[in-house]
């Protein structure tokens, strides 16, 4: 009997169909002539009904066997073969992961091949995004290093352009300065394979001139970035489109460089990919430009240098991020018997012995973390009571090596009897422990200062906003500043200065309550929020800081730690902003008094 008749007359068992439906991957069967003899519904949804057609004609619009075809390799080698394929469907580009396995008759002869097609587009886009962000974090790190070690503006500008192109994977980066009289923008540094694009470029910040009404001119005048994610579709880019086409430019972004609040220059970056500049990349470039603006100010404020150092540490930590794997396991639960059949991969993931591929629903539930069991039962029973929806949930399960792993479960009821009673549930599961760990790490990085381990400025600002709607009053505010840090950095090096900052952070952390928010809000500045703390409680806490400071100065050699402190108390949310300003003002008052010769000004506000 021909293989086509064998497949058509003997379709997969209903249980297999159910499992295939739950997996969500496309499945197609080819005979030895590459004719399609079976498609599941997923494949038909993607490519249409192609049964009876030649696979490379139906799926790739080709007249010959595709290069690196997994089915062809499967036929020739007799082994499973997997490749990634890029396919264009209806003007959209998809990435599919294709896995072909041989089908043999009773004599062992290969008569057909089954191909599993998984849509990997989202995963590839996520990988590209992570790679792009990693490159930009590299660029930011190296930018900060250049700022710290550069002593000349033009050298710094050349470094910035080279770093942006090399690590940001850009076509071109250019920094231009603005003539305050004419508004003309003159390139002073550039780098990139499209550098010749600048030869015929005339740009201005003057709105009265045509070359001043483009993206760069708008960014300079408005003082905010201007992003063209579709360079050839943006109405402001008409005068430059022909040259941009020649050099393969499809998107751009202009970031004004400021001095004392005024735009004095611009960083212009170009990419060959449309839609390159998403919000995260824009934020990274904006941070880069902020640091450049700070460098132009001759490192006037030490806080800016500290932020650059902190950004360097954070960006290097983020290089550890990796994508979660997509090697899922499959399971099929017979509700009547309680038996769960598993794929070998799923059995391996939950710690079953080699070759063991059967367990029970009770055994699986025993592996679920105690805190997650109520939610898991709720999800499962909700699924059993409905007739249409699938479930999608994440929870922890015990692993063979001890401890717990996070799993992502997806599935649905695939069989019900005539009364709607569920008989069978099938689905897939994947280990997402690494993903969860990364989320926790990112959450920590986004809220904590890398040098001291205290909360950072962003977290402190968010807490101030939250306190505006809190009932935890009276509320104390303490602002602290390390005395003489600039002198220590200039004369003994930043490593010594970092040690002073860490000692100051330890003094504050050990002097306040565990529920108080202690944050580093700048290079040498700290702030504390104390809920349910009256003026007397705040003063006692400040006394503890001063005592701790004295003790640590007695115990340690080297530079003495000196902290200026100011505090205020708010009895209601209406007084919160005033209390914050008053605490800051008092802190500066005590700092000035110490500089004027008062060796021990009273710091109890």
Image: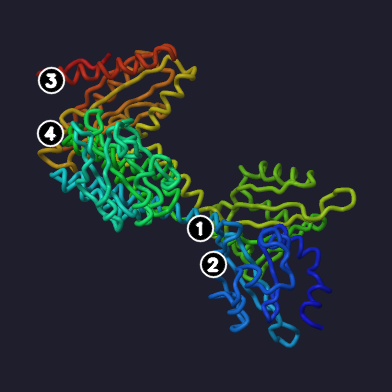
Judge whether residue 201 can be spotted in this image: yes
> Is residue 594 shown left or right of residue 219?
left
Neighbour tally class for label 3: few under 14, some 14-19, many 20 plus, Cα within 10 Å = few
| Mark closest to the chain's N terminus, 3 or 1 | 1
Q: Where does the C terminus fall, quadrant-wise? A: top left
Secondary structure, mark 1, is: helix
**Residue that badge 3 annotates:** 599
User: Which of the numbered marks, if any, corresponds to residue 394?
Assistant: none
Which residue is nearer to you in this view: 420 or 115? Answer: 115
Q: Spatial distance from mark 4 to mark 2, Cα to Cα? A: 59 Å
Badge 2: how crowded within 10 Å, few (<14), some, or many (20+)? some
The correct choice, above or below, for 603 with respect to 448 in the image is above
Give the mark, 2 or 3, whose residue is nearer the N terminus.
2
- Look at discs 4 and 2 and give the one toward the viewer: 2
Question: Disc 2 and disc 3: Cα gap in Å?
Answer: 71 Å
Q: First in sequence: mark 3 or mark 4?
A: 4
The answer to the question of whether label 2 and label 1 lie on touching residues, with beta carbons closer than 8 A, is yes
**Marks 3, 4: nearer the viewer:** 4
Q: Is residue 465 above or below residue 500?
A: above
- For mark 1, what is the residue? 124
Element at label 4: helix
> Residue 487's mark?
4
Q: Are marks 4 and 2 in contact (CB under 8 Å)?
A: no
Residue 84 is tagged as 2
Question: Between disc 1 and disc 4, whose residue precedes?
Answer: 1
**Number of callouts in the render?**
4
Where is residue 308? Give x, y as percent: 27, 41
Give left or right: position of 200 versus 15. Answer: left
Q: Secondary structure at mark 2?
A: strand
Quarter assignment of residue 43: bottom right
Q: What crowding class fits label 4: few (fewer than 14 Cα within 10 Å), some (14-19), or many (20 or more)?
A: few
Along the line of sight, the residue nearer the viewer: 439 or 224: 224
């Amino acid at each position: 009997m021909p293989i086509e008749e064998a497949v058509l007359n003997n379709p997969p068992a209903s249980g297999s169909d159910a499992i295939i439906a739950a997996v969500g991957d496309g499945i197609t069967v080819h005979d030895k002539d590459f004719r399609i003899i079976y498609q599941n519904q997923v494949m038909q949804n993607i490519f249409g009904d192609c049964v009876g057609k030649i696979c490379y004609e139906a799926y790739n619009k080709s007249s010959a066997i595709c290069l690196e075809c997994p089915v062809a390799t499967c036929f020739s080698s007799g082994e499973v073969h997997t490749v990634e394929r890029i396919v264009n469907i209806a003007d959209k580009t998809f990435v599919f992961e294709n896995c072909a396995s041989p089908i043999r008759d009773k004599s062992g002869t290969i008569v057909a091949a089954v191909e599993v097609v998984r849509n990997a587009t989202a995963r590839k886009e996520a990988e590209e995004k992570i790679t792009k962000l990693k490159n930009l974090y590299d660029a930011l790190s190296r930018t900060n290093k250049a700022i710290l070690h550069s002593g000349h503006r033009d050298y710094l500008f050349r470094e910035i352009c080279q770093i942006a192109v090399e690590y940001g994977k850009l076509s071109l980066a250019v920094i231009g300065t603005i003539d305050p009289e004419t508004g003309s923008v003159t390139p002073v540094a550039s780098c990139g394979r499209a550098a010749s694009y600048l030869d015929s470029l005339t740009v201005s910040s003057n709105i009265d001139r045509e070359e001043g009404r483009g993206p760069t001119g708008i960014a300079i005048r408005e003082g905010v970035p201007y992003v063209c994610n579709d360079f050839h579709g943006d109405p402001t880019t008409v005068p430059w489109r022909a040259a941009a086409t020649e050099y393969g430019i499809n998107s751009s972004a202009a970031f004004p460089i400021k001095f004392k609040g005024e735009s004095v220059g611009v960083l212009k970056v170009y990419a060959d990919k449309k839609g390159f500049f998403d919000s995260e990349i824009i934020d990274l470039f904006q941070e880069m430009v902020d640091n450049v603006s700070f460098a132009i100010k001759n490192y006037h404020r030490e806080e800016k240098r500290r932020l650059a150092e902190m950004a360097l540490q954070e960006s290097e930590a983020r290089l550890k991020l990796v994508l979660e794997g997509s090697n899922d396991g499959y399971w099929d639960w017979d509700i009547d018997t309680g038996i769960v059949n598993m794929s070998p991969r799923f059995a391996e993931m939950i710690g079953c012995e080699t070759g063991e591929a059967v367990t029970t629903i009770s055994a699986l539930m025993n592996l679920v973390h105690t805190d997650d069991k109520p939610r898991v039962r709720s999800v499962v029973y909700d699924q059993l009571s409905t007739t249409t929806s699938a479930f999608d949930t994440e929870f922890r399960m015990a692993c063979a090596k001890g401890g717990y792993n996070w799993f992502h479960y997806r599935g649905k009821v695939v069989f019900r009897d005539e009364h709607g009673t569920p008989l069978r549930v099938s689905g897939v599961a994947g280990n997402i422990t690494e993903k969860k760990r990364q989320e926790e790490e990112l959450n920590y990085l986004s809220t904590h200062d890398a040098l001291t381990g205290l909360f950072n400025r962003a977290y402190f600002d968010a807490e101030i906003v939250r306190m505006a709607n809190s009932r935890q009053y009276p509320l104390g505010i303490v602002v602290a500043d390390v005395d003489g840090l600039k002198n220590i950095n200039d004369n003994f090096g930043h490593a010594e200065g970092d040690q002073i900052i860490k000692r100051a952070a330890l003094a504050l952390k050990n002097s306040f309550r565990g529920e108080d928010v202690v944050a580093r809000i700048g290079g040498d500045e700290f702030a504390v929020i104390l809920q349910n703390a009256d003026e007397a409680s705040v003063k006692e806490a400040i006394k503890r800081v001063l005592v701790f400071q004295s003790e640590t100065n007695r115990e340690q050699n080297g530079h003495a730690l000196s902290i200026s402190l100011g505090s205020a108390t708010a009895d209601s949310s209406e007084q919160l902003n005033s209390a914050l300003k008053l605490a800051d003002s008092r802190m500066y008052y005590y700092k000035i008094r110490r500089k004027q010769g008062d060796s021990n000004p009273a710091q109890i506000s």
